[in-house]
Image (cartoon, grey):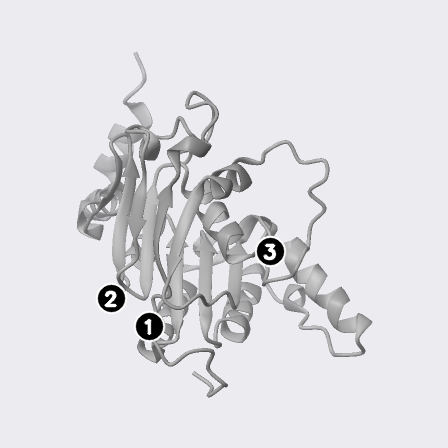
């Protein structure tokens, strides 16, 4: 990792803990308060390692939680760095991440808000925003979109994830082949070894879940709990498929037929 001026000599993680202020919740029956992680009407989450990974089925609140953490750091809910506003949200209906952030309190040691919030679904908009911003000041645009989708992702990670800071990655594997996911794993390892980067990531990739020295959590109907990647539904499904593809597909494709 390239040497740069450090904001602090303390090592990651910088964001140590987030907790819910229950008094700020107006209606527990509304999203996001009706998510499993708030079933006890309280929530506290500690970060003890440089890399934290969150897994779970679609709709369990992973992205909403990452949006809220991003808002606490100072990032736009569409992604980007601090101060970036790549998308106009004036007409947006979904404000769940922002609502959750307003009810959370966070503890830092120290507060480091440099870094990046990467969202796969808004990568195109953020990349275009970066190109326009560069051209406005007479600089060469990064031009991440002239490459294939996966190559653009990797070039983006390699360029933007080298400084000291906190990096929130929401499903970064979306455009990456297994080989490219290994490249991302190598980058995550460099970030972890540097001691100056904190990563909070949501993923469906068993490869990324197996990131060494990362702490893995699973969101389920019971809440948010630490787990081992061998115990995730994602790993078990891929293991069963690789063990006997024909039998796996025969059961999976026809299990709902009469």
Residue 131 image position (x, y, % from top left): 72, 67
Left or right side of 95 for 130: right
Q: Quadrant of the C terminus?
A: top left
Residue 252 image position (x, y, % from top left): 29, 30
Q: Residue furthest top?
A: 258
Circle 2 sits on which residue? Answer: 212
Q: Quadrant of the N terminus?
A: bottom left
Circle 3 sits on which residue? Answer: 123
* Real-space CA distance between mark 2 and mark 3, rounded to the nearest whole angstrom: 26 Å
* Real-space CA distance between mark 2 and mark 1, rounded to the nearest whole angstrom: 9 Å
Under tag 2, what secondary structure?
A: loop
Q: Residue at x 40, y 68 (%)?
A: 110
Left or right side of 77 for 225: left
Callout 3 crowding tier (Cα within 10 Å): few <14, some 14–19, many ≥20: many
Circle 1 sits on which residue? Answer: 192
Question: Depth check: 199 or 190 in front?
Answer: 199
Relative to 114, does residue 231 appear above or below in the rendering?
above
CB contact under 8 Å: marks 2 and 1: yes
């Amino acid at each position: 990792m390239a040497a740069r001026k450090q904001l602090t000599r303390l090592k990651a993680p910088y964001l140590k803990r987030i907790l819910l202020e229950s008094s700020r919740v107006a209606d527990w029956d509304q999203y996001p308060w009706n998510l499993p992680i708030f079933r006890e009407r309280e929530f506290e989450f500690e970060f003890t390692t440089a890399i934290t990974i969150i897994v779970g089925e679609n709709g369990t609140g992973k992205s909403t939680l990452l949006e809220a953490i991003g808002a606490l750091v100072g990032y736009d809910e569409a992604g980007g760095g601090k101060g970036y506003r790549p998308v106009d949200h004036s007409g947006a209906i979904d404000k769940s991440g922002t609502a959750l952030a307003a009810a959370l309190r966070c503890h830092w040691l120290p507060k480091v808000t440099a870094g990046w919030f990467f969202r796969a679904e808004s990568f195109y908009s953020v990349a275009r925003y970066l190109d326009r911003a560069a051209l406005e000041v007479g600089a060469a645009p990064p031009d991440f979109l002239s490459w294939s989708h996966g190559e653009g992702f990797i070039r983006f990670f390699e360029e933007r994830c080298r400084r000291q800071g906190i990096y929130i990655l929401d499903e970064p594997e979306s455009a990456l082949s297994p080989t490219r996911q290994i490249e991302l794993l190598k980058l995550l390892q460099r970030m972890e070894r540097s001691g100056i980067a904190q990563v909070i990531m949501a993923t469906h990739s068993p490869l990324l879940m197996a990131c060494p020295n990362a702490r893995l959590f699973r969101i389920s109907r019971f809440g948010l709990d630490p787990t081992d990647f061998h115990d995730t539904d994602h790993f078990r499904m891929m293991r069963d498929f690789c063990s006997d593809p024909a039998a796996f597909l025969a059961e999976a494709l026809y299990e709902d037929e009469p």
